[in-house]
Amino acid sequence: MSQVIRLLRAVPVIMVASLLVPCAASAQSLERHGGAPVASDRGQAGRAAGPATYDPAVWFKADFWGREWPDGFTLNHDVTLPIRTRPEIGAPKTVDCMLRKGATYHPWNMKRVKADRLSFVTFTRISTYELKRDHSSDLLKISNDERVTIKFKIGDRWSAVGPGAEGFFLMRVGNDVYQGYQDMFDASAEIGGGLAASLEDDGHEWLQLRCANGAAGWIFYDEVKEAPGFSRTEACGYGCAEDRKLARRRSSPSGTTR
């Protein structure tokens, strides 16, 4: 049942509108030897731009990768690279992780999600907004999937806190998290910024996985998405992703001499 909530005063909200501070991290340099590239910056922490750790007062953690068409990557050939044991840019890369040619790491590739125990996590920088006019918005409360109508007054505050998909993002009012929509940005201005605008899903995306060699750890997506040997996943339809099918080698005809 839908209900109406009336805000009587400005309430600080953490709305992690799939907006993470754009990460300026560049792809790691890979050195190939015998078809198994190895990242060359083992043990060097903080090379990528970003926080050493994610302060929950500043960053919101969501257990998925957002966007209507989520990010993902596929291996063009066998790769070995050092990865971290925890999702922190400042953590050293102490684990050797082997990834096989054709493997696709994507939220929609459920076969590999289950086989390699994949977990997709996004950290989004929290942005706080203030209503510039009275505004009523229909929202979906995440905790119980309940539709509610919140009547905001000029000066009320909310925060963008998480990535979304298909036109919504995650916003927090008080201690409750909701699915928010474009109308909230249209009626608000960011604290310390100009008029609120639509926010693209842009966060620090991390993948936890079990590697082909049995090792386990975390990959920071920004460090591999443009790296040699990696390509962006080509979905097989909406909600569908799968490992790339490898071409079979033709056997020599019987009786053929070389």
Image (cartoon, rainbow, N blue to C red):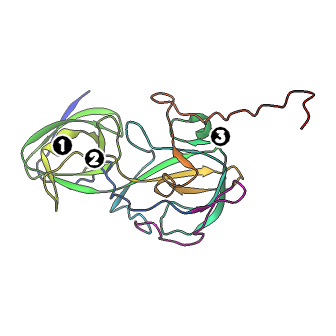
Helix, strand or loop under label 2: strand
Q: What's the residue type where badge 3 is placed?
A: Ala
Does any portion of residue 84 appear in the rendered image? no
The dominant secondary structure in magenta is loop
Q: Would you call the spot at circle 2 few (<14 residues within 10 Å), some (14-19), or many (20 or more)?
A: many
Q: Would you call the spot at circle 3 few (<14 residues within 10 Å), some (14-19), or many (20 or more)?
A: few
Where are the magenta residues, as a range? Answer: 30-51
Position in image of residue 43 (x %, y %): 59, 71
Dot in front, 3 or 2 = 3
Q: Hey, which residue is sitting farthest front in the picture?
A: 258
Helix, strand or loop under label 1: helix
Q: Residue at x 30, y 42 (%)?
A: 169
Position in image of residue 113 (x %, y %): 58, 40
- Magenta stretch encompasses residue 42: yes
Circle nearer the N terminus (3, 2) = 3
Q: Hey, which residue is sitting farthest bottom in the picture?
A: 44
Real-space Cα separation, disc 3 to disc 2, in angstroms: 33 Å
Residue occupied by mark 2: 171
Circle nearer the N terminus (2, 1) = 2
- Magenta stretch encompasses residue 89: no
Please report contact status of discs 2 and 1: CB closer than 8 Å, yes or no. yes
Left or right? Give the position of 252 relative to 168.
Answer: right
Q: Which mark is residue 115?
A: 3
Circle nearer the N terminus (1, 3) = 3
Does any portion of residue 141 appear in the rendered image? yes
Q: Is residue 181 placed above or below 85 in the rendered structure? A: above
Position in image of residue 256 (x %, y %): 90, 30
Residue occupied by mark 1: 184
Instruction: Pick the quarter of the image with the N terminus.
Output: top left
